[in-house]
Amino acid sequence: MFRISQYMRELAQAQATGAYPVVKDRKARGPVVIWNLIRRCNLTCKHCYAFSADHEYAGELSLQEVFTVMDDLKAFGVPALILSGGEPLLRADIFEVSARAREMGFYTGLSTNGTLIDAPMARRIADAGFDYVGISLDGLKATHDKFRRLEGAFDRSLAAIGHLDKVGVKVGLRYTMTAMNGHDLPALLDLMQEVGAHKFYFSHLNYAGRGNIHRGKDAHHQATRAAMDMLFDRAWAAAQAGSMDDYVSGNNDADGAYLLQWVQAHLPQWVEPLRARLIAWGGNASGQQIANIDNLGHVHPDTMWWHHDLGCVRERPFSQIWNDTSDPLMAGLKQHPRPVEGRCAGCRHLAICNGNTRVRAQQLTGNFWFEDPGCYLTDAEVGAASTPFEPAPPKRRRIEVVAA
């Protein structure tokens, strides 16, 4: 996650005091774990990476198995759990999981589509002590309902934000931009202010799950740049006004280098201090500071790597799986610098972005380490030329047979 507002607040402080603030990044010993506790979902969203549907999935971790994994995660130094799905509120014991997470001292977030949150459910979420709830919106009503394949989904999710705000739960909007919904971004940013949300998470499209099917409709790079300019301007205005509203982005670590260019154009005296901060941030953290456990207990470098299995927590503790570099992908992800190829290898910003998102390169070319096709910086901006590639031959998709 790229914390745009954090850097903008530091820049605003530097402008006010004449000195860039001294900030120490403290990386946890273990990774943040995004945990898909359940695959079932009441929606079938077009860009779902989990291919979820509204039925039970056999073989999911039991509550006791979840607790056992949590013990290992805590001992391993994992600082935060993001409980996700599917739709996590469909899991009958979700509040037992969250209660134990709170007792163990994890920062605990909930990632939900929001359609199941009425006033009583909002109160349960508040009582459970979730630190943060992220609700996904794909645009305004017409766009969102089309993406979510459910008429009325937008109204229900919007109502959920209000219910959570009333009971004091910190809530934010999550948005994945494609060519099909980019036109709604300005209105969504306005909506954030109107409904009581205090965070806006802008996700670039990643080529995984249904997002892989729709990668041909990914927003063009110019549209991505325009969207980032808009987010930077909003975050800078908020920082200058002393607002604690957060604007963050994810799934494209070129955002760090692009922010550096924005600062070069607007606040050039702070370019070098910011560059040092961004290098300390370190860019893409898949396989390092970000991890994923799916509903069956399989571990992945992040949520977009469900097609790459590192091992199962039923067979080995997460801590052992995560430290095992016998897997070629994990060995490369943990390497510094990563063994990237193409223009990524010669990029002047490699120390900032860390090679960006490897799953896009793998999905498009079959090569983990090829240049990220989602990088929206020009060849001149990265200081390296693009390398032609041959798309990987189509592979047979393994058909998963699940209990209905």
Image (cartoon, rainbow, N blue to C red):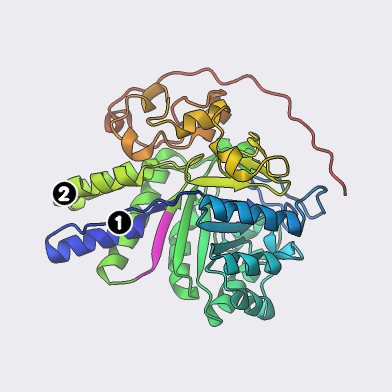
- Counting from the top left corner in percent of width and height, residue 49 is at 64, 45
- Counting from the top left corner in percent of width and height, residue 350 is at 34, 33
Mark 1 and mark 2 lie on one chain; the one further toward the N terminus is 1
Nearest the eye: 292 or 318:
318
Q: Is residue 41 left or right of residue 239?
A: right
Magenta extent: 244-248
Which amino acid, mark 1? Tyr
Q: Relative to 205, is 266 above or below?
A: below
- In the picture of the structure, the residue carrying the numbered disc 1 is 7
Q: Residue 238 carries which label?
A: none
Nearest the eye: 217 or 376:
376
Q: Mark 2, residues whose alpha carbon is within 10 Å: few (<14), some, or many (≥20)? A: few
- Discs 1/2, front: 1
Q: Which mark is residue 268?
A: 2
Q: Is the magenta stretch mostly helix, strand or loop?
A: strand
Nearest the eye: 157 or 297:
297
Q: Mark 1, residues whose alpha carbon is within 10 Å: few (<14), some, or many (≥20)? A: some
